[in-house]
Amino acid sequence: MTPEEEEAIRREFEASRKEAHKEQPHQAQAPDGFELNQFSSIKHVIGIVSGKGGVGKSFVTGILATELMRAGHSVGILDADITGPSIPKMFGISDQRIAAMDERMLIPATTSTGIRVVSTNLVLEHETDPVLWRGPLLMGVLKQFYEDVLWGNIDYLLVDMPPGTGDVALTVFQSLPIEGVVIVSSPQDLVQMIVGKAVNMAAMMEVPVIGLVENMSYFVCPSCGEKHELFGPSYAQETADHFGIDLLGRLPIDPAIAKICDAGTIERDLPEHLLDAALEIIAEHDA
């Protein structure tokens, strides 16, 4: 973060402090859950979930954040995958650190286009340091990442959830005002069972499912242009139909996109229109 960007955030913080006694615009606040601080306003909170790890959940989070930003929305990312965070590297901010202000408030890292990010990798001394924290500490960090961060006024907060249905995922569902979830899967014989776990968890928490994204769905041969389903035939549409949810898209295996993520240039170089169906449904929240 440049000195100019940090100074801009400080000015916004001071302006928010002066206006704190006035009526705030609509902001997401979870009843009986985590409470957003008085200096921040978040219109919509969307979770990105998966029934298992390794399916590209963080990648889908990055796509949605980038496309929402390109559409003119202000965006934040809460990287709730606390023990396996990858968002900072994808956005090229691994060298940044979350700063403290006013003895309590935290200033999120800011990407090149203004997306605000909190992640455990932004508080560790080295990004390769393991996070050897037990449940209560993980829950405390998650609470602090939502309540004590100076988010400012943003339209969409995307929550990159940990895989599966464990403690952290349950805490997110119970404590944050999640309006809907995007489920990410990959092609495999067990996809229906794995997606079913995420769908059923969302149903138990009374959170709507926005739809399903299948990642690593196929590979396009650069020589002949033919699609190859390297992990077997796709069951995405069949699975979506089975659970009565929308299929939001099938993302290819693309070495060029992998290179973009490794280089941290997703905002600049990501191809457009990868998940238009997801963005259309998410945008309905503002209708």
Image (tube, helix red, strand yellow):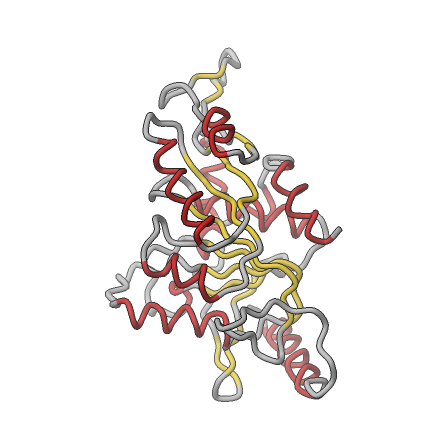
Asked whether 154 or 268 is in front, the reply is: 154
Residue 103 percent across, percent down from the top left: 48, 88
Point 66% across, 86% down: residue: 17
Q: Count how many numbered circles sit on residues in the image.
A: 0
In-image side of 17 versus 96 (left or right): right
Residue 182 percent across, percent down from the top left: 52, 45
Quarter holding the N terminus? bottom right
Q: Quadrant of residue 217?
A: top left
Asked whether 151 or 245 is in front, the reply is: 245
> In the figure, 232 relative to 140: above or below?
above
Asked whether 204 or 252 is in front, the reply is: 204
> In the figure, 68 relative to 193: above or below?
below
Point 40% across, 32% down: residue: 186
In-image side of 19 versus 168 (left or right): right
Residue 55 percent across, percent down from the top left: 39, 39
In-image side of 287 versus 111 (left or right): right
Point 55% across, 32% down: residue: 247
Residue 197 percent across, percent down from the top left: 37, 43
Q: Which residue is outermost to the top?
A: 224
> In the figure, 144 relative to 18: above or below?
above
Point 35% across, 41% down: residue: 54
